[in-house]
Image (cartoon, rainbow, N blue to C red):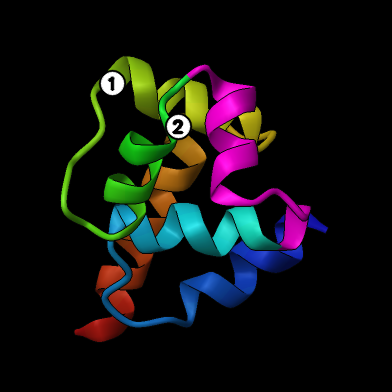
Amino acid sequence: MTNTIISRAIDVPDLSLGQAIELLRRPTGLSARGLSLASGLSESYVGKVEKGELEPSLRAFACIARTLGLSAREIHVLVVRSAGAAA
């Protein structure tokens, strides 16, 4: 299922990191609160990351990715490919 979600997300032009995280979170059934609890981050922090108001630290990014069952690299590649789709 994750590969299908990633494949669809690549087609979204100019996807920000926060948008990618939200896009990958929703199909898991996790709310932003659920993601924050599972990753050990505050709900406010996760919300700000998803809204693009804050860039996550590397540690936080790795925790979020791991909670979503992905690596930080997989999410980063998704955002980079999305930027290429916008070009």
Which residue is depicted at the point 64% across and 51% down?
31
Q: Nearer the viewer, residue 49 or 87?
A: 49
Residue that badge 2 annotates: 72
Q: Quadrant of the N terminus?
A: bottom right
In the rendered structure, which disc, 2 or 1, sits on the residue that comes first in sequence? 1
- Residue 77, which numbered label? none
**Circles 2 and 1 in contact, beta carbons < 8 Å:** yes
At label 1, the amino acid type is: Leu
Residue furthest out toward the right: 1
The vertical placement of 67 against 29, above or below, is above
Kind of element beneath mark 1:
helix
Residue 40, percent from left and from top: 52, 17
- How dense is the environment of label 1, judged by Cα within 10 Å: few (below 14), some, or many (20 and up)? few
Magenta stretch in the rendered image: 27-40
The vertical placement of 9 against 58, above or below, is below
At label 2, the amino acid type is: Ala
Residue that badge 1 annotates: 58
